[in-house]
Amino acid sequence: MSDPTPPPVQHLDLGAFELAGGHVLPGARLAYRTVGELNDARDNAVLLPHMYSGTSEFMTAFIGEGRPLDPTRYFFVLPDQFGDGVSSSASTQPPPYDRGSFPAVAVSDDVRAQHRLVTEHLGIERLAMVSGWSMGGQQTLEWAVRFPDAVARAVPFAATLRNPDHCSVFCDLHMDALRSDPAFAGGSYARSADVALGLRRHAQAFALMGATSHMYREEAWRELGFTSRDGFVQGFLQAYFLPMDPNDLLTQAAKWKASDVAAVTGGDLDAALARVTAEVTDVAFTGDLFFPPEDVRADAERIPGARYEEIGSVWGHFTMFNLRESDTAQIDEVYARVLG
Amino acid sequence: MSDPTPPPVQHLDLGAFELAGGHVLPGARLAYRTVGELNDARDNAVLLPHMYSGTSEFMTAFIGEGRPLDPTRYFFVLPDQFGDGVSSSASTQPPPYDRGSFPAVAVSDDVRAQHRLVTEHLGIERLAMVSGWSMGGQQTLEWAVRFPDAVARAVPFAATLRNPDHCSVFCDLHMDALRSDPAFAGGSYARSADVALGLRRHAQAFALMGATSHMYREEAWRELGFTSRDGFVQGFLQAYFLPMDPNDLLTQAAKWKASDVAAVTGGDLDAALARVTAEVTDVAFTGDLFFPPEDVRADAERIPGARYEEIGSVWGHFTMFNLRESDTAQIDEVYARVLG
């Protein structure tokens, strides 16, 4: 952002919102931010959902005057996903759906809520683009399948149509890491900081899988100012995750693990993909241990008309954290091509 | 083995054995098995150290009449590494070095003890080959550097000269998984089965890193008779690790993490490698998440005269578990080339 102050958070009251899992969430709220202005034709809107552990603020890092995501040209809508602590979440919901008893949410729940925001509240029929990273990419793909008429372009980064099985093994591990802290107490801890041990274990799992062996071999963490590998794990990963709420992370992680765009067609993936009309650019990151390039490429070959691109970086899944200028530049190039 | 009964375990008393870390381990014992007969020239001995979590029995899987490792032709020595529960270990050592207070052991300690076994006890000056997988490969490389005159051929599978940094992040994670169980109690648990929760978490880490995303995508676990991914994790990984002793695993894991052949030359790796006279065949497994092929290849380019080979399998680091006949066949081919 050229303006370092993030735009303010707004809320849409969804009322009693029926979730895919069957629960009805009373007083559900969808938080979001906007950047730029909707034009008179209402055709310059871009939706940018965020990744696991992020909030609506994250994707503002790719918006800037003179950049492909230019706020003088586009109207950006940045939704908070359920469970991120800003939209309805375990940490914000009153009893009986609070804390460890917050119901399971699906990626499709986020997308259906966002669809209401975009169409009913903002009066936008068709988005010029939907794009996001990781869980933001899962939401992007879900949009393209579930609401094909509302998406002109879909640009998922580092995400797949269905969560890869190996990635589900990873989700099991990092979810269990949070729960392994005796202070977690089935999610009924008093303060999230009480579960610091679980949050640290969870951070270690991301130190292992978020970057690549190549990054550690090159000691690319030195570029971030760290002087040792352990310093990076503690000063970057633990520092990042420690302020978060374990129940909120678990809500998001369960969504991530269960993600599957074929839910809308009862599990028939080909039928789901036949619905897609958006121009899809499916982007993988070299060395990504969550969503390997071969899975993203296989998806791209299956989605009608989709293009496959791969961005090379030592950062693997973390490429979109903008830890190297060349990473951000390559992402901007994708956006420039798609929107150009 | 053509004979399904493994050869009996023997023991060499090492007396008070000084460890690289400074402790002197009283009454140290090195366990081992032998297969075949030492010839009159005493030049047909092959040493086969084993991997993390294994014992001397493991490498018998590659020995068989008519196979490259033929017991009618070679005399095989299969040592148990310290901490494997058969040689001196946390689970076998009397106080004050018992359980959580077992001292840190280095790969070089194993190799020095094995050198005494081979030279002083068995009267062998030079081994026709040293070969092993993973930590067995670390020991193989340590042999080639530390006792160059005693090694004609060195064939490490899936191991590196120094533990890769990323692999150390993995070691931190799976060691912490064992300690995360409140019943671990600093290593002073009464029975290893009390730490079942820690052993299960540790198994999950190996489910994530031991195989590959490719294996999960192909559901190659079906070939082992499992009907679900979770069934494989529980029935294969948990079943494998649950009977083990956490303190013993931690002794081995700390060795693995700290492994570095340059210790013998005060950290100077080039000086260490200049010592090597063995014919080295450095073998990587495609997709190995512990010791990636690019690291093994970089080692091979640095070791004087070494050859690099790569074995393709969906099983990644677990390729040497012989889960597919084609994996075993490729390993046998390496041995045939080296010994042929």
Image: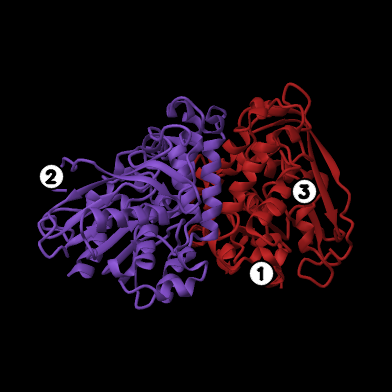
Chain colours: A red, B purple
User: What chain is tagged by disc 2?
Assistant: B
Residue A175's x, y, as percent?
59, 38
Disc 1: CA contacts within 10 A as few (<14), some (14-19) or many (>=20): some
Residue designated by label 2: B3
> Label 2 near label 1: C-beta < 8 Å?
no
Same chain check for tags 3 and 1: yes
Disc 2: CA contacts within 10 A as few (<14), some (14-19) or many (>=20): few
Q: Spatial distance from mark 3 to mark 2, Cα to Cα?
A: 71 Å
Q: Answer yes or no: is residue A285 visible.
A: no
Q: Answer yes or no: is residue B240 visible.
A: yes
Residue B322 versus residue A261: which sits nearer the camera? Answer: B322
Does B288 sit above or below residue B148? above
Q: Residue at x 77, y 66 (%)?
A: A69
Residue B184's x, y, as percent?
53, 31
Identify the mark at residue A118; answer none if there is no mark: 3
Q: Residue at x 43, y 53 (%)?
A: B212
User: What chain is tagged by disc 3?
Assistant: A
Does A100 sit above or below residue B256? above
Residue designated by label 1: A334
Residue B186's x, y, as percent?
56, 33
Identify residue type, mark 2: Asp
Residue B140 versus residue A305: which sits nearer the camera? Answer: B140
Q: Which residue is most to the front?
A: B16
Left or right of B77 on screen, residue A236: right
Q: Spatial distance from mark 1 to mark 2, Cα to Cα?
A: 61 Å
Identify residue type, mark 1: Val
Q: Residue at x 78, y 44 (%)?
A: A117
Left or right of B243 on screen, residue A265: right
